[in-house]
Image (tube, grey):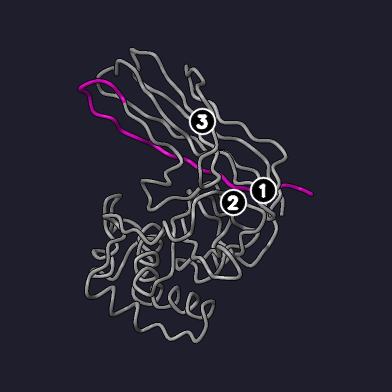
């Protein structure tokens, strides 16, 4: 599938910031399921800094905006060809050992309820177990936008019984770790959901490491594995670690953020 992306993130400061420094993971991953035709990320008034590829295989780009800054906009535009690989990540070069992802972070730390949920999954082989773990998370946390926030943990989302894709991904990572399966958070885009409805925001899911197969993506929010509707950007231990945009503004003012994302299918 050929998809086009137009993603704009606007940062507004009630008091001009002295400067803004950001690092971006906004370049699509390089693997067998994605081929970039054209892609560009720009920052209004920004100076492009160093670029490097980290141990997880993600391209990281630095940016600096000299102050005073009242508004800064990050825009991503591009066209990409995607293929359905049934969630299997092949041809992606990285150096981080899978067992590193057995480390818990604050959003993915398990509690008694998450441990019980993990042990309710009954897959008889590693791949079947991974599918069942995703299914039990989808069954325990209903998709409902607006009931959680950026800092909600997997344990809190499970206790609430509701959440969004970020909460599903954190919960899946947590229950997988209980069962000894490495899991990581993946950020990206989704063209349409399981019902074929256009998806109006960036998306997130999880990847679990299956011995003999490698990393396999699971999206409990849509109860499927990523296919050609998905664009993979980067990965990390949790949402903050895998965030497409991370940064800091120097100053005492408040920062507000507005995000618009448009994903469309392009003519072949």
Q: Nearer the viewer, residue 213 or 77?
A: 213
Q: Is residue 192 magenta?
A: no
Q: Distance from label 1 to label 3 (Cα)? A: 23 Å
Determine whether the residue tagged by mark 1 lies in a helix, strand or loop.
strand
- N-terminal of the two: label 2 or label 1? 1
The residue shown at (42%, 44%) is 243
Q: Quadrant of residue 28?
A: top right
Q: Are marks 2 and 1 in contact (CB under 8 Å)?
A: yes
- N-terminal of the two: label 2 or label 3? 3
Q: Which percent across, then down, holds residue 97?
A: 49, 55
Task: Provide the major secondary structure of the magenta segment.
Answer: strand
93 relative to 48 in the view: left or right: right
Q: Quadrant of residue 121?
A: bottom left
* Residue receiving disc 1: 3
107 relative to 189 in the view: left or right: left
Determine whether the residue tagged by mark 2 lies in a helix, strand or loop.
strand
Rendered position, 228 above or below 52? below
The residue shown at (41%, 18%) is 65
Determine whether the residue tagged by mark 3 lies in a helix, strand or loop.
strand
* Residue receiving disc 2: 231
Provide the residue span drawn in magenta: 249-268
Rendered position, 91 above or below 79? below
Q: Which percent across, then down, holds residue 73?
A: 45, 27
The residue shown at (31%, 59%) is 104
Query: Which tag is nearer the camera, tag 2 or tag 1?
Result: 2
* Residue receiving disc 3: 61
The residue shown at (44%, 62%) is 183
Q: Which percent across, then down, holds residue 166?
A: 38, 57
């Amino acid at each position: 599938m050929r998809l086009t992306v137009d993603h704009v993130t606007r940062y507004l400061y009630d008091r001009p910031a002295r400067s803004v420094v950001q690092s971006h993971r906004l370049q699509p991953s390089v693997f067998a399921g994605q081929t970039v035709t054209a892609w560009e990320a720009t920052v209004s008034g920004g100076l492009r800094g160093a670029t490097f590829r980290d141990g997880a295989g993600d391209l990281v780009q630095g940016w600096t905006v000299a102050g005073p800054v009242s508004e800064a906009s990050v825009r991503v535009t591009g066209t990409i060809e995607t293929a359905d690989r049934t969630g299997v990540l092949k041809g992606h070069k990285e150096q981080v050992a899978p067992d590193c992802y057995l480390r818990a972070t604050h959003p993915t730390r398990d509690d008694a309820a998450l441990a019980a949920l993990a042990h309710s999954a009954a897959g008889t082989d590693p791949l079947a177990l991974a599918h069942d773990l995703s299914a039990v998370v989808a069954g325990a946390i209903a998709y409902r936008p607006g009931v959680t926030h950026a800092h909600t943990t997997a344990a809190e989302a499970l206790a609430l019984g509701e959440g969004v894709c970020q909460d599903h991904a954190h919960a899946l990572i947590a229950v997988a770790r209980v069962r000894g399966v490495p899991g990581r958070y993946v950020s990206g885009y989704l063209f349409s959901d399981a019902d074929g409805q256009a998806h109006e925001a960036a998306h997130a899911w999880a990847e679990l490491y299956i011995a003999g197969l490698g990393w396999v993506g699971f999206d409990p929010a849509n109860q499927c594995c990523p296919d050609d509707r998905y664009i993979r950007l980067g990965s990390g231990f949790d949402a903050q670690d895998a965030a497409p945009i991370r940064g800091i503004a120097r100053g005492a003012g408040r920062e507000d953020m507005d995000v618009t994302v448009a994903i469309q299918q392009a003519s072949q």
